[in-house]
Image (cartoon, coloured by chain):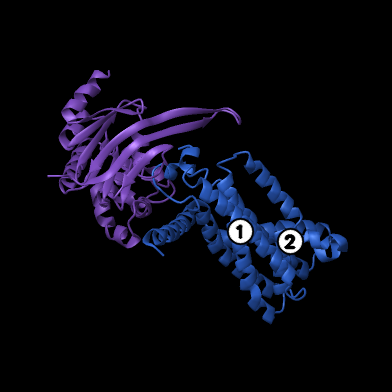
Chain colours: A blue, B purple
């Protein structure tokens, strides 16, 4: 690794650390929000699906949390990364800095927060009486796959939006569509008709959430198909963002307003 | 004595594309056919009216803007552009911004952290150093930027109106610090509207007008020509 590369990663690590520190200083409940936020979201969904629609069992709450927490990570990171490069004119006009820096700061910052949230998830599952199995040891696989998916999707949207601002509306609509088609609050295995199931799981978040449920809730053995779907999406999105960032690397400073 | 050329600029041209609508972009030329050399250890002044292309030129030299025509050839390892806001993040404290700003200028975090006490002392902003920079006045912001910039020594230092800082007493202190730095064989390119500073600090100067160099050489002759442009 040459010194310029090394400096890039050191700068990235420093910026993530400083951002987390200032975020904590800004909010009175600081770190507690990282757990309070998914708890509140889960409470709302529980009220709708568990109470109003009469699915109020502990196993449903666990099912909901295992879908909701990974989804929140994905949507929040992609949403935050979306304008990260477009909004970085103040730095891009003063320093020579690789454009990937901006979405990567968002991805890194969110991944650290998610490590805390996932610890909360495991504790919640224990409280709801979900048995701890050997499958839980496979959690880092799903986590690493999600980190890869979040990184490649975030870099792609961040690299394209300065070229075409209108794309942000499409990203927001796309995120909403992916949310409804990911099986966060319903069990796809029993609700989606079997001839559409494979197509349904081509959605990387649907496959990923299914993987989390297989690992944490023991809903079957780890499926190679789901892993493959996520890996292919990571490679495709990663390749496209690499192409965009490489091609426009020297143009962003002049494309983005100060 | 032959002087070593550190940066060589040949046929440099740069155009801004302003998007008015999807299919009709407007092109605004910022620099055209710019040719000059920068010698090791010299202080080169860049003068010109507003919109003459001075800041664009510094950004092209720093590698921030890629030229549309011509080339910028450089033998310098580190070229740092120093402006009045050093990429400060409003929600971070002065201390954290100083660390990040120093790193953006190319220095490692250990070095910058070891300089923090001196940066704080030089800036003279006291306890505000620990407060978020969104609470700073513009004078305090420029004091902090200047204090960080003075603590680093890149091969080539590009200064964009950096001496227009703070109140009169701080400006005198900043001017003195800058004079010492320039005297220590630092290669510096210096944009300023202050004619006195150009005459006192620069070995040579170039005059930019509508994106072209219309004169270069002795600062006294350049300033005389600059005044004729009024």
Residue B64 horizontal/vertical position (percent): 40, 44
Q: Mark 2 and mark 1: span between their CA atoms?
A: 14 Å
Query: Disc 1 on helix, strand or loop?
Result: helix
Residue at the disc numbered 2: A206
Q: Chain of mark 2?
A: A
Query: Disc 2 on helix, strand or loop?
Result: helix
Residue B164 horizontal/vertical position (percent): 27, 35
Lateral position of residue A213 relative to residue B146, left or right = right
Residue A205 horizontal/vertical position (percent): 70, 60
Q: Which quadrant: the C terminus of chain B? A: top left
Lateral position of residue A246 relative to residue B4, left or right = right
Where residue A209 sits, quadrant-wise, is bottom right
At 55% from the left edge and 45% from the top edge, which residue is drawn? A83
Residue at the disc numbered 1: A150
Q: Residues within 10 Å of mark 2 (few under 14, many from 20)?
A: many
Image height of A42 relative to B81, above or below: below
Towards the viewer: A56 or A164: A164
At 72% from the left edge and 71% from the top edge, which residue is drawn? A224
Q: Which mark is residue B70?
A: none
Where residue B44 sits, quadrant-wise, is top left
């Amino acid at each position: 690794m040459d010194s310029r590369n090394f400096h890039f990663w050191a700068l990235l690590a420093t910026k993530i650390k400083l951002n987390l520190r200032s975020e904590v200083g800004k909010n009175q409940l600081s770190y507690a929000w990282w757990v309070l936020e998914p708890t509140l979201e889960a409470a709302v969904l529980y009220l709708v699906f568990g109470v109003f629609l009469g699915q109020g069992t502990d196993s449903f709450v666990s099912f909901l949390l295992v879908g909701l927490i990974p989804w929140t990570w994905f949507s929040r990171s992609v949403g935050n990364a979306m304008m990260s490069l477009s909004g970085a004119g103040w730095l891009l006009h003063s320093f020579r800095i690789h454009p990937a820096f901006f979405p990567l700061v968002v991805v890194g910052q969110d991944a650290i927060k998610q490590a805390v949230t996932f610890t909360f998830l495991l504790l919640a599952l224990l409280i709801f009486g979900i048995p701890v199995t050997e499958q839980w040891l496979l959690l880092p696989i799903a986590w690493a796959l999600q980190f890869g998916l979040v990184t490649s999707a975030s870099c792609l949207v961040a690299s394209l939006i300065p070229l075409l601002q209108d794309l942000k509306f499409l990203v927001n609509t796309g995120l909403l569509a992916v949310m409804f088609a990911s099986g966060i609050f319903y069990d796809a295995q029993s609700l989606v008709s079997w001839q559409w199931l494979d197509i349904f799981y081509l959605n990387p978040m649907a496959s990923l959430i299914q993987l989390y449920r297989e690992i944490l809730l023991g809903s079957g053995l780890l499926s190679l198909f789901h892993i493959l779907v996520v890996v292919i999406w990571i490679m495709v999105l990663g390749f496209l963002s690499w192409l965009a960032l490489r091609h426009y690397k020297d143009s962003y400073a002049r494309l983005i307003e100060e | 004595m032959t002087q070593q050329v550190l940066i060589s600029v040949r046929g440099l041209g740069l155009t801004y594309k302003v998007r008015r609508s999807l299919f009709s972009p407007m092109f605004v030329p910022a620099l055209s056919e710019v040719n000059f050399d920068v010698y090791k250890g010299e202080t080169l002044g860049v003068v010109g009216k507003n919109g003459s292309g001075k800041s664009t030129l510094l950004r092209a030299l720093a590698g921030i803007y890629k030229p549309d025509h011509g080339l910028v050839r450089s033998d310098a390892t580190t070229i740092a552009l120093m402006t009045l806001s050093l990429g400060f993040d409003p929600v971070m404290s002065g201390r954290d911004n100083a660390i990040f700003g120093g790193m953006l200028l190319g220095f490692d975090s250990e070095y910058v952290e070891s300089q923090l006490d001196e940066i704080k002392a030089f800036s003279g902003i006291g306890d505000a150093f620990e407060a978020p920079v969104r609470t700073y006045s513009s004078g305090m912001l420029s004091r902090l930027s200047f204090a960080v910039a003075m603590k680093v020594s890149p091969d080539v230092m590009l200064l964009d109106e950096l001496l227009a800082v703070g109140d009169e007493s701080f400006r005198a202190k900043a001017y003195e610090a800058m004079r010492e730095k320039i005297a220590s064989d630092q290669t510096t390119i210096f944009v300023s509207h202050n004619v006195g500073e150009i005459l006192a600090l620069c070995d040579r100067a170039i005059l930019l007008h509508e994106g072209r160099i219309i004169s270069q050489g002795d600062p006294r002759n350049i300033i005389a020509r600059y005044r004729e442009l009024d």
